[in-house]
Amino acid sequence: MDRAFENHASFIGRPASELPTPSLIVDLPVLKKNVNTLHENVEKLGIGFRPHVKTLKTLEITRLMLAGGKYRSIIASTICEIRGCIPLVKEGLLDEVSPPRIPAASYQILYGLPIYPGALQDLVKLRESVRIQLLVDNEEHIDVLEKSGTQPWDVFIKLDVGSRRAGIPANSTALQKLVERADRSSAVKIAGFYCHAGHSYAGRSLDEAQATLETEISSVLNAAALLPPDRALTVSIGATPTAHVVQYLKTNIPSNVKFELHAGNFPCNDLQQVSTGLVAETDQAIRVAAEVCGVYPERNEALVNAGVVALSREGSGYSGFGRVIGKPAWEVVRLSQEHGIIGTNGDERATENFKIGQRVNLYCNHSCITAAAFYVYFGVDENDIVREAWIPWKGW
């Protein structure tokens, strides 16, 4: 069992420097600032907000993103995440199944993958406790739901606006056929249209993020126009980079359409987000604490105990797989399973910067993937004292 997990409560009140390595450390003031900034932008625009719980998969962070119940819907990428959020129903932060059904505007948990038969049994059971919406992007999804014999489902039709992941191409004849097919099916009720601009992570400027945001908005509104203008619908757009520029939203929203933003990475940020030019290095709320295991003067490198399993092989606009905080010339240049190799392209010497047993803190390229490796998240205050120890949901 993970050492940090076994004794996590014992570290509360102690300096982060006493945590075992590798550990995932969350800077609480930065995280709360990031969440508050997005909430303020959403509130100024008067639009809805649906957080994605895939990054720091915990009740504590989900409560924070929901602003104590001000926002009452989420996206979950796994069945495990939905199960993990059930206590929020009992707390009154998510709606249970008993209130009157309001199909297009109801507050629900959206399962973030296009529906497939293997997930239906679990989702049917979970729907006894909480309202659940599904994603569809193919007429075969309607067939699956019709054959299942379950009660009708509220569905979002997912659009592909450039990510080339899930979704049906926006403005395609296939989209129109899917809308018509879903609209006449007794197995589904179209709640609205959804797109996720995952490709916005590759942007490198404010202008690029704004252009992607405009594409998202025009795509979901054009799709909504395929249905009668008196039909109540929700359109959901977002990704953390476009969420960072949502304050520039200027589109007029039709009166029958409820507009919402979704995002998940925004409380944490990471080197991918810094690469977009939309957030500062100091807006990163998580880091990985590691320890130097070896120093190699002949190749001017050091070894730390955080490799692929702790950091992932995700890339960013920066070279390498992570950067050493406080030592900007040094980065993680190579990885194996449990080994991270620290190197530099500069003139500094490893022997002058690193000693065996020295602790180093690393910024990661993608906080969502990095966080998935850890069994406990340690929240620290402005003095780097551990104040929280959160246990994330694990599994699919």
Image (tube, rainbow, N blue to C red):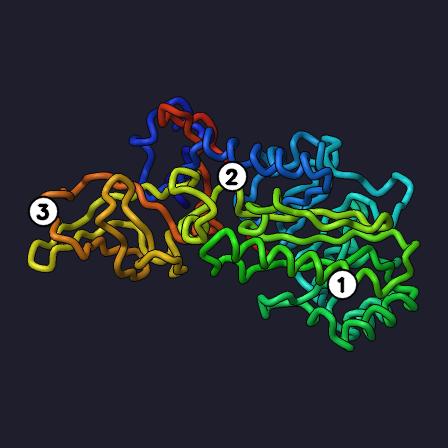
Q: Which residue is mark 2?
A: 391
Indicate the amino acid at tag 2: Ile
Q: Secondary structure at mark 2?
A: loop
The residue at the far bottom in this view is 173
Residue at coordinates 85% horizontally, 67% vertically from top-left? 182
Quarter location, residue 23: top left
Residue 346 is situated, as x and y percent measured from the top left of the image, at 16, 53
Please tell me how crowded label 2 is: few (under 14), some (14-19), or many (20+) other residues with Cα within 10 Å: some
Indicate the amino acid at tag 1: Ile
Q: Nearer the viewer, mark 1 or mark 3?
A: 1
Quarter location, residue 171: bottom right
Q: Which label number is shown at residue 315?
A: none
Residue 10 in sight here:
no
Residue 8 in sight here:
yes
Q: Which residue is mark 1?
A: 157
Residue at coordinates 65% horizontally, 67% vertically from top-left? 160
Q: Which residue is mark 3?
A: 351
Instruction: Compute the Cα span from label 1 to label 2.
Output: 33 Å
- Of label 3 and label 2, which has the lower sequence position? 3
